[in-house]
Image: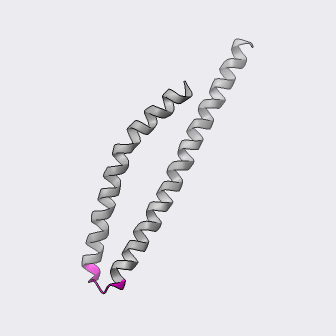
Amino acid sequence: MLKSQMYFMIQNIKKIALLSESQIHFMIQNIEKTALLSEHVNLLATEMKPETADQEIRDFETQVDLAEREQQKPFSEKTVKRVF
């Protein structure tokens, strides 16, 4: 295989890996938003004060954000190692 063909294939593999990671991230965000909305509805259904429910949701969002930040770096490193 020619050097230029190998370079082209490697570039395509990189694009596919990035696209897949991006799609996965988008799907996770949608799931998180759905979970937050569902939890908010559940809190309001238990006749919790709206202000208290809002604070509970903000706390939950903060926990999700922190967990996501912790997981992003190892996931990206694994992707790079897997591709190369």
| Residue 40 in magenta stretch | no
Q: Which residues are magenta?
A: 45-51
The picture places residue 2, in percent across and down from the top left corner, at 74, 12
Above or below, comparing residue 67 to residue 49 in the picture: above
Residue at 44% x, 32% y: name it.
Answer: 77
Residue at 58% x, 43% y: name it.
Answer: 20
Above or below, comparing residue 71 to residue 39 in the picture: above
> How does the figure colour the protein chain or chains?
one colour
Above or below, comparing residue 2 to residue 46 in the picture: above
Using the rendered view, name the quadrant where residue 19 is placed.
top right
Figure label count? 0
The picture places residue 13, in percent across and down from the top left corner, at 63, 30
The picture places residue 24, in percent across and down from the top left corner, at 54, 49
Q: Farthest residue to the right: give it.
A: 1
Residue at 43% x, 73% y: name it.
Answer: 38
Residue 8 relative to residue 57: left or right = right
Along the viewing direction, whichever of 84 and 54 lies nearer the viewer: 84
Using the rendered view, name the quadrant where residue 74 is placed.
top left
Image quarter (top left, top right, bottom left or bottom right) of the N terminus? top right
Residue at 29% x, 81% y: name it.
Answer: 50
Q: Farthest residue to the top: give it.
A: 2
